[in-house]
């Protein structure tokens, strides 16, 4: 994250650009970038204050006298606890499913299931169902991240002679493209820790594309001066 001094300089430069900007879209772009940088400046100041407070507290604590109390060792009289054996599960990856606008039904082909020997856990974005002691084996059907959210308290598992039916109640009506969540590759990746200078460069490019001829000449000169080591005087040509 940029230092407080760098953020202050960036804000001053953007506010100067805001004064000379003429086109509404350019003014809006600059205003949005100013708001983002002001938030980053506040966060940086808060982080600095917290660090100073922590350092002060640590210094105070180091000056306090330390008292050591000797506690005699006592032999424990508690009975030994035998650890439960770790259960192994066979994953159930073969199942079918269908849906309507309100719910999803999953059909698991599994015989010999007893209702009292299954364990079901539903969460807003996942489910985990364990089947115990089926002909000497344990089975498990789980999806760690569903396509969309469900209502856990309304979901259920019904045992049939030759299959198990899992009903997932959708949190919002609609059609699911898949049971599993898939990242939307078309969604832009918003980096919360984005470099403020990268944002300023993007803003300058947009201003250049949207600005009039005078604005383009001014920005082009600022870029040229920055490349030649005159970045500190890049706004000298502005009226």
Image (spheres, rainbow, N blue to C red):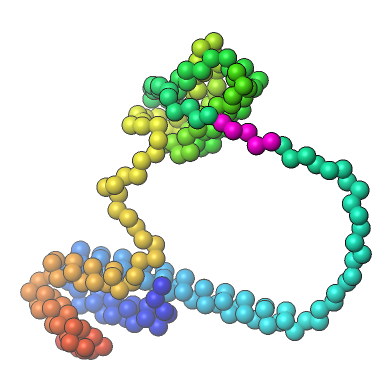
**Residue at 26% in and 88% down:** 232
45 drawn magenta = no
**Residue at 62% in and 24% down:** 132
The image quarter containing residue 214 is bottom left
**Which quadrant of the figure contains the C terminus?**
bottom left
Query: Would you say 220 lies left or right of 27 here?
Result: left
Query: Would you say 100 lies left or right of 25 here?
Result: right
Q: Does the rendering let one see residue 125? A: no
Q: Nearer the viewer, residue 166 or 230?
A: 166
Q: Residue furthest left?
A: 213
Residue 75: image location, x then y, percent? 91, 55
Residue 118: image location, x then y, percent? 61, 24
Is 70 situated above or below 10? above
Image label count: 0
- The majority secondary structure of the magenta stretch comes to loop
Residue 121: image location, x then y, percent? 58, 32
**Magenta highlight range:** 85-89
Q: Residue furthest front?
A: 136
Q: Residue furthest top?
A: 161
**Residue at 47% in and 34% down:** 143
Is 149 situated above or below 35? above
Is 61 situated above or below 132? below
Q: Nearer the viewer, residue 13 or 91?
A: 91
**Residue at 72% in and 81% down:** 62
Query: Would you say 208 lies left or right of 53 here?
Result: left
The image quarter containing residue 152 is top right
88 drawn magenta = yes
Q: Nearer the viewer, residue 194 or 43?
A: 194
Residue 1: image location, x then y, percent? 41, 72
């Amino acid at each position: 994250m940029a230092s407080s001094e760098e953020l202050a300089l960036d804000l001053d430069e953007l506010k100067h650009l805001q004064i000379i900007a003429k086109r509404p879209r350019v003014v809006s772009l600059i205003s949005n970038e100013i708001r983002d940088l002001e938030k980053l400046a506040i966060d940086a100041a808060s982080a600095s204050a917290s660090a100073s407070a922590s350092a002060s507290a640590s210094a105070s604590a180091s000056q306090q006298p330390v008292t050591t109390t000797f506690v005699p060792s006592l032999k424990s009289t508690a009975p030994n606890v035998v650890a439960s054996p770790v259960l192994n599960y066979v994953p159930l990856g073969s199942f079918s499913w269908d849906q309507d606008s309100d719910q999803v039904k999953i059909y698991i082909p599994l015989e010999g299931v007893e209702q009292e020997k299954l364990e079901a856990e539903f969460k807003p974005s996942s489910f985990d169902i364990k089947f115990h002691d089926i002909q000497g084996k344990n089975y498990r059907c789980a999806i760690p991240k569903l396509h969309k959210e469900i209502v856990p308290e309304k979901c259920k598992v019904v045992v049939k002679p030759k299959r198990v039916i899992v009903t997932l109640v959708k949190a919002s009506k609609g059609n699911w493209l898949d049971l599993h969540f898939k990242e939307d590759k078309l969604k832009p990746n918003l980096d919360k820790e984005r470099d403020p200078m990268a944002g300023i460069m993007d803003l300058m490019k947009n201003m250049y594309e949207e600005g009039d001829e005078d604005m383009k000449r001014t920005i082009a000169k600022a870029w040229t001066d920055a490349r030649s080591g005159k970045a500190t005087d890049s706004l000298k040509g502005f009226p």
